[in-house]
Every structure is written in C-alpha cells, then in structure tokens.
Amino acid sequence: MQPHPRGTREPGAAGGLPALGRDEWTVLSAPGAIGWIREVVLDSADPWALSAFWSQLVGGTPEEWYDGWVTLEPPPHGQRLSFQRSAAVRVDRPSVHFDVLVADLETAHDRVLDAGGRFLEERWSPRAAANGGEVPWRVYADPDGHRFCLVVR
C-alpha cells in the first residue's frame, strides 16, 4: 500500500488530497492496520484561544468546522491539529486523543476489541456527510485508558 497523501480536508486544495468526492476517499494504510491517525485533538474550554496559540507555534489558520470544533488549516506539515470545546478539561491530566480514520467502522470496531481496546460510546458529528446523512464515530480506550476515536469520512 502507498502512504496516505497528506493535506487539507478539502479535495483538490493546494497540497491536499486529490480532487475526489468525499465518498471516493480511500483510507490507505500499512498492511494489517485498521486506518491512520487523521488528527490530534486537544480538549479546551476555549478552542479559539488555544488554536490561536498553537497556530503561532506550528502555523495554520484557525477555522471553525462547527460550533466548538476549531482546526488549523491547512494542516501544519500535513498533520491535522484540532481543538474541541470541553467543560471537563483538567490541568493535572491534559485531554488529548487521536482520531483514527477507518474505511469500515464495524470491522475496525471488532479489531479494536480483539486487540484489547474498550468501547466507550458512539456519537454523531454535527456536520452532515456529503450525501446529507449522519456521520458516526466511536470512542474507545486503549488498555492503559487513553481515549481515541474511530471515524469514517
């Protein structure tokens, strides 16, 4: 398999993914992998302020995808960095998680459980899919309790 092309969330953008429709995106990953880390997400009481701080350090311009979710665009050095509003931010234990992009949520779910992960909950994005449908994602914990999400988009 080829490494995943790095780039922005918009197909055809300079330095971004090829000009394909969202439904045509393909998850490219190493043999045996269920997906790739789409982005690193930091919880914050004020995602705009935190994104402004990080944009000064790594580049990119803060862009609100939807209420409470801000992403640096274009992704600095190909890695997407997002900021999620959360009232449960703890300074003694920073809230960071990975979003893992997968081609098939059910298959990836089974593989996470088989590997020792723990399913926590299913949620739905406030942003609709290209076809207008709902976009689910699932929250898991690794064996040490670190949270991560499986996403399809």
Image (cartoon, helix red, strand yellow):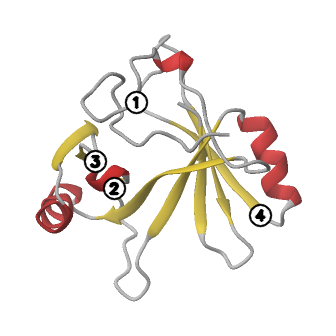
The amino acid type of the residue labelled 1 equals Leu
Check disc 2 and report the residue beneath it.
81
Is there CB contact under 8 Å for labels 3 and 4? Answer: no
The amino acid type of the residue labelled 2 equals Leu
* Depth check, front residue: 86 or 114: 114
The amino acid type of the residue labelled 4 equals Gly
> Going by the image, does 118 lie left or right of 69?
right
Distance Cα–Cα, label 2 vs label 4: 24 Å
Pinpoint residue 11: horizontal percent, then vertical percent: 36, 23
Secondary structure at numbered mark 4: loop
Pinpoint residue 105: horizontal percent, then vertical percent: 71, 37
Name the residue rendered at 78%, 36% in the picture. 106
Name the residue rendered at 35%, 50% in the picture. 78
Pinpoint residue 145: horizontal percent, then vertical percent: 66, 75
Distance Cα–Cα, label 2 vs label 3: 6 Å
Check disc 1 and report the residue beneath it.
17
Secondary structure at numbered mark 1: loop
Pinpoint residue 44: horizontal percent, then vertical percent: 30, 65
The amino acid type of the residue labelled 3 equals Thr
Distance Cα–Cα, label 2 vs label 1: 17 Å
* Number of other residues with Cα within 10 Å of mark 1, as a class: few under 14, some 14 to 19, many 20 or more: some
Q: Which mark is residue 71?
A: 3
Q: Which mark is residue 117?
A: 4
> Going by the image, does 23 lie left or right of 48?
right
Is there CB contact under 8 Å for labels 2 and 3? Answer: yes
Secondary structure at numbered mark 2: strand
* Number of other residues with Cα within 10 Å of mark 3, as a class: few under 14, some 14 to 19, many 20 or more: many
> Going by the image, does 71 lie left or right of 139?
left
Viewer-nearest of discs 2 and 4: 2
Q: Residue furthest front?
A: 2
* Number of other residues with Cα within 10 Å of mark 2, as a class: few under 14, some 14 to 19, many 20 or more: many
Name the residue rendered at 62%, 38% in the picture. 28
